[in-house]
Amino acid sequence: MAEPTTSDAGAGPPAPRTSPLAHLADRMRAAAVTGARGVTLAEWPFVTMVNLRVDPASEAAVRIEKTLGAPLPRQCGHTTASGPHTLVWLGPDEWLVLSHADGTAVAGELGEALAGDPGSVVDVSANRTTLELSGPAARQVLEKGCPLDLHPRAHGPGRAVSTTVGPVAVLLWQVDDAPTYRLFPRSSFADYLARWLIDAMAEYRGPEVP
């Protein structure tokens, strides 16, 4: 048996995972506003995200839908869900699978369903993090820097689209009519976006200007 090398002998247990916004957790909690103009911000770290590409008219797509237990959304902004999975439309042949299940397992099952047919399955969980913005004033906070029409007549629960908030590109998903939004920025831009949102939330601590 080979002798352990110096680096092997000195290696301890692997370092615990650290989310992109762990250093801002206290600031996000402190930024929370309560009451009629309330809004809260929190990170949901380590959400499983799998990028899926496949021809939606193919037999492989049918197998993938059976594996996920939900149809692939076919229109911009649409989502579908089943069990731990939510499927988000990214393009005519591209989706993001968000899941509470293990990323390796989800990617493995989808890869088996693809079965060598044209397409791709890639675990991109480390590429983004998740911010949740919720409360009566959440829409107004986003409207300070998002070009979308977020009024309920145009954007409601279940809608998910690619857009920008401030200068940061995000996938924006409205979860419910509280309203609660989940934003998926690239991990490298998450710090900037979180600080931008904290700053945008600050005015709701004071009384509403008539």
Image (cartoon, helix red, strand yellow):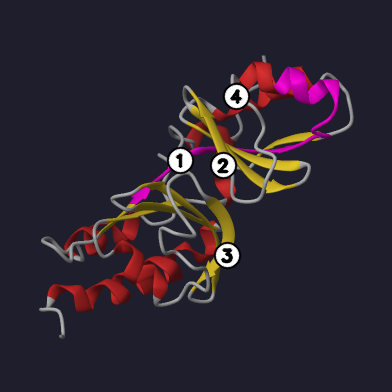
Q: Residues within 10 Å of mark 3 (few under 14, many from 20)?
A: some
Q: Is residue 11 above or below residue 38?
A: above
Question: Are the two marked residues, 3 and 4, in contact with CB atoms closer than 8 angstroms?
Answer: no
Indicate which disc residue 70 carries: 4
Q: CA distance from mark 3 to mark 2?
A: 19 Å
Question: Are the two marked residues, 2 and 1, in contact with CB atoms closer than 8 angstroms?
Answer: yes
Which callout, 4 or 1, points at the residue further toward the start of the chain?
1
Question: Are the two marked residues, 4 and 2, in contact with CB atoms closer than 8 angstroms?
Answer: no
Which residue is depicted at the point 32% across and 59% down?
23
User: In the rendered image, which quarter is residue 49 located in?
Assistant: top right
Element type where label 4 sits in the image:
loop
Q: Nearer the viewer, residue 171 or 56?
A: 56
Which callout, 4 or 2, points at the residue further toward the start of the chain?
4
Q: Is residue 129 above or below residue 150?
A: above
| Quarter of the N terminus within the rendering | top right
Which callout, 1 or 3, points at the residue further toward the start of the chain?
1
Give coordinates of residue 71: x percent, y percent.
Answer: 64, 27
Give coordinates of residue 138: x percent, y percent.
Answer: 31, 62
Q: Residues within 10 Å of mark 1 (few under 14, many from 20)?
A: some
Which residue is depicted at the point 68% across and 22% down?
65
Badge 4 amino acid:
Ala
Q: Residues within 10 Å of mark 2 (few under 14, many from 20)?
A: many
Badge 1 amino acid:
Phe
Mark nearer the viewer, 1 or 3 = 3
Q: Residue furthest front?
A: 153
Per the image, the residue denoted by label 2 is: 125
Classify residue 62 as left or right of residue 156: right
